[in-house]
């Protein structure tokens, strides 16, 4: 009786927690759930249009794919001197039969301009229903003087990473009515409504309903004494909780047992790694990532967890051979506890991350509460990996050597210390298949930008985590009976 | 309590154990992947009733340890099935879960957890375990500094603190110096006569005669005889 009541209590608790999380999540991530911000890329600047003097008219036509147009930016050049006057920009909407209607006029004060920098011009009111419509940007200057005027850039190729691709289908820039070999360096910012945000409450309610039904099924099965996967998991967990706890604490105690600093190493290690890489990559290789220390540390903390848990977990079956051949304990306990110990280690190394975030003055927003989602997915993914690796290791001892090479490749294939922008376009697909890339990107968006990632990012992380766990679980389950014969 | 039904256990023996992909591929290419099945158990069936002490005798390699491992769930039989009702405490080898960097106290909890004791139980019995092991203040020292006798005493004390429903014993364990040996033997006998179901493997026929209700005689993986302790032992001795 006691147990059944506990299960029901647990179910109610799970539902309550789910409801609170669903509401909290919406409160934090509402903006990103409902709309996506699209920043279009500009062409690479190849040449300038020359000084923009009274009488010069630049006309650039462009199309918008976002639902709303909220602003645009242009790349200005000053010829490295101080200039005077203003730059007049007018935005028109193109209508059929060559007609156009003025949306707004904006002027930029030239005297404050820096060489080769982008100037953002937000629209007074976001322009709705913009998708698929064409616009025309007209640039002129009424009060500039020769030798004292600024310029704009144009080009005809797009840079993705280190490769320049010819920009397909560009619309030429017209200078004084004549087309130029290129298109203006222009970026637009827009917003697109996401259907997920609109129907969020339906999704949340649907998932809640499923959860409730599943709980109900569990309780019904418990009553009838039938068994199903969920019940077995719950029972195994309650039964072996103490063992898991003991094994995790053993891992932890023995790790730092005879070191002087002990647990401080959990803080120090990622910090020192970051320091070394920071010095190397910010001085030797000039990297122009904003807030590089936080960028680096986020990647290091997450990837360290991955490589540590896999590196240690690969031996979790063989290392406990003496136990496995003597006492019956479900064998998955060993890899799972190994990952959990590394997970606790990762939680410790979040402390220096938070310290660095505070020290560098990165704004901390409620979005940081979404970080546990990325960490949970990462832990799930690593569990799956370790299940596979540790069982492969039993049959083929070569696995550990292959893995050490593979994990090195994996490290370089993940943007930890280099920016995503240097990834060549043709490899981008490969990167998108790398789960670590997604976990780290998720964490960085949350920590550095202080906003929630787009709904797709959640889905991707979840799919990788659940997928790895299912595959790992099945693989482990199929092979575990043969372990005893091979260790 | 325990029902062993037609259990067979085959070990696959290849000429040399293949442990790397290279070796595997080489063997595969040379078509040298020959296996020889060794049947450690062949069609073994018996039952153990609640509260019964069942002895298992046989020569070396007869499959005694294998059947114990199958019953305790460590090995999965090639065919047949084992049904067990109740929690098992296997006493196959003592102290296999010890971690040498941890103290005696930490090892009591770790080893206890591995044997499936709940935390509350260990909290209650902690003093009893320490008292029985006669370790005194050494309990707070890492056990890598223990002598082998101390280690065995601790392991024995942890393993025998329970009153399990099913106890699996591979030879009566007598560890430590003479005084402790007497004490531990006493403890084992207490445990075994205390109403628990016991599976007991021994080479000492005197012990078997003294302790067991029924005896299974295994020979080359098959049951040669099963019945009253006295009868089987007499037949075995001839």
Image (tube, coloured by chain):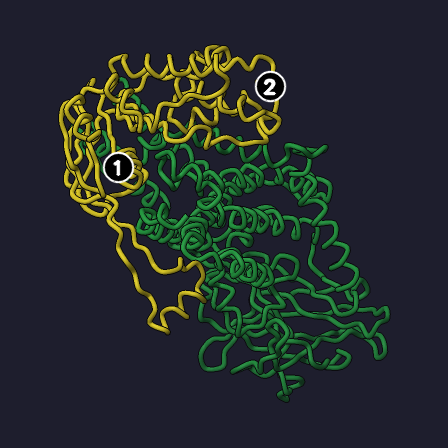
Chain colours: A green, B yellow
Q: What element carries label 2?
A: helix
Q: Indicate whether B83 appears above or below A73.
A: above
Q: Indicate whether A150 appears above or below A66.
A: below
Comparing labels 1 and 2, the label whose residue is closer to the camera: 1
Which of B226 and A221 lies nearest the eye of the viewer? B226
Which of A350 and A59 lies nearest the eye of the viewer? A350
Q: Judge left or right: residue A301 versus residue A116.
A: left
Reading the image, the residue beneath label 1 is: B67
Whether discs 1 and 2 lie on one chain: the answer is yes
Mark 1 to mark 2 CA distance (whole Å): 38 Å
Which of B154 and A482 lies nearest the eye of the viewer? B154
Q: Mark 2 lies on which chain?
A: B
Q: Which residue lies furthest to the front in this view?
A: B238
Image location of residue A105, percent across then percent down: 63, 66
Density class for disc 2 (Cα within 10 Å; few <14, some 14-19, many ≥20) is few
Q: In which quarter of the image is residue B32?
A: bottom left
Q: Judge left or right: residue B220 versus residue A338.
A: left
Q: In which quarter of the image is residue A360?
A: top right
Badge number at residue B140: 2
């Amino acid at each position: 009786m006691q147990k059944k009541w506990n299960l029901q209590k647990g179910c109610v608790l799970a539902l309550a927690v789910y409801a609170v999380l669903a509401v909290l999540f919406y409160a934090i991530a509402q903006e990103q759930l409902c709309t996506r911000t699209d920043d279009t890329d500009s062409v690479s600047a190849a040449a300038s249009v020359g000084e923009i003097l009274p009488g010069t008219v630049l006309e650039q036509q462009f199309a918008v794919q976002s639902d709303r147009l909220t602003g645009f930016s242009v790349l200005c050049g000053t010829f490295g001197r101080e200039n005077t006057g203003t730059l007049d920009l007018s935005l028109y909407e193109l209508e059929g039969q060559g007609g156009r209607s003025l949306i707004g006029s904006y002027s930029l004060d030239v005297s404050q301009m820096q060489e080769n920098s982008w100037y953002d011009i937000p629209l007074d009111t976001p322009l709705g229903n913009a998708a698929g419509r064409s616009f025309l940007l007209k640039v002129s200057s009424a009060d500039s003087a020769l030798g004292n005027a600024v310029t704009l850039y144009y080009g005809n190729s797009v840079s993705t990473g280190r490769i320049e691709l010819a920009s397909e289908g560009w619309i030429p820039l017209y200078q004084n009515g004549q087309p130029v070999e290129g298109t203006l360096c222009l970026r637009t910012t827009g917003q697109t409504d996401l259907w997920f945000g609109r129907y969020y409450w339906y999704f949340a309610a649907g998932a809640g309903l499923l959860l409730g039904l599943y709980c109900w099924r569990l309780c019904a099965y418990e009553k009838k004494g039938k068994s199903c996967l969920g019940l077995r998991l719950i029972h195994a967990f309650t039964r072996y909780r103490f063992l898991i706890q003991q094994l995790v604490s053993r891992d932890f105690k023995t790790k730092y047992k005879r070191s002087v600093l002990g647990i401080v190493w959990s803080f120090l290690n990622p910090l020192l790694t970051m320091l070394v890489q920071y010095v190397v990559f910010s001085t030797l290789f000039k990297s122009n990532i904003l807030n590089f220390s936080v960028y680096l540390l986020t990647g290091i903390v997450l990837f360290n967890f991955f490589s540590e848990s896999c590196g240690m977990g690969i031996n979790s079956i063989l290392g406990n051979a003496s136990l496995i051949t003597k006492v019956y304990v479900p064998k998955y306990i060993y890899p799972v506890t190994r990952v959990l110990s590394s997970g606790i280690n990762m939680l410790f190394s979040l402390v220096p991350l938070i310290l660095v975030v505070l020290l560098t003055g990165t704004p901390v927003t409620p979005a940081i509460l979404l970080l546990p989602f990325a960490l949970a997915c990462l832990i799930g993914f690593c569990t799956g990996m370790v299940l596979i690796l540790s069982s492969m290791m039993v049959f083929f001892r070569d696995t550990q050597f292959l893995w050490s090479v593979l994990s090195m490749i994996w490290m370089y294939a993940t943007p930890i210390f280099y920016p995503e922008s240097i990834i060549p376009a043709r490899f981008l697909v490969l990167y998108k298949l790398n789960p670590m890339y997604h976990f780290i990107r998720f964490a960085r968006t949350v920590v550095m930008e202080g906003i929630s990632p787009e709904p797709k990012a959640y889905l991707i992380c979840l799919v990788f985590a659940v997928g790895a766990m299912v595959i790992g679980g099945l693989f482990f389950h199929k092979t575990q009976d043969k372990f005893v014969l091979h260790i | 309590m325990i029902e062993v039904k037609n259990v067979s256990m085959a070990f696959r023996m290849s000429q040399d154990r293949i442990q790397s992909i290279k070796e595997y591929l080489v063997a595969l290419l040379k078509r040298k992947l020959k296996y020889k099945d060794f049947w450690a158990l062949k069609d073994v069936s018996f039952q153990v009733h609640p509260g019964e002490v069942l002895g298992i005798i046989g020569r070396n390699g007869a499959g005694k340890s294998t059947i114990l491992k199958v019953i305790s769930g460590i090995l999965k039989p090639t065919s047949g099935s084992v049904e067990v009702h109740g929690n098992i405490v296997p006493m196959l080898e003592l102290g296999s879960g010890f971690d040498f960097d941890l103290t005696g106290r930490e090892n009591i909890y770790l080893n206890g957890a591995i044997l499936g004791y709940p935390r509350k139980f260990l909290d209650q019995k902690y003093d009893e375990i320490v008292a029985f092991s006669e370790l005194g203040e050494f309990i707070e020292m890492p056990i890598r500094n223990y002598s082998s006798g101390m280690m065995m005493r601790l392991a024995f004390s942890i393993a025998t603190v329970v009153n399990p429903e099913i106890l699996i014993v591979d030879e009566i364990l007598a560890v430590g110096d003479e005084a402790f040996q007497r004490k531990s033997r006493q403890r084992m006998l207490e445990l075994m006569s205390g109403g628990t179901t016991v599976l007991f493997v021994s080479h000492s026929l005197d012990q078997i005669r003294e302790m067991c209700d029924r005896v299974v005689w295994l020979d080359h993986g098959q049951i040669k005889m099963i019945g009253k302790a006295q009868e089987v032992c007499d037949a075995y001795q001839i």
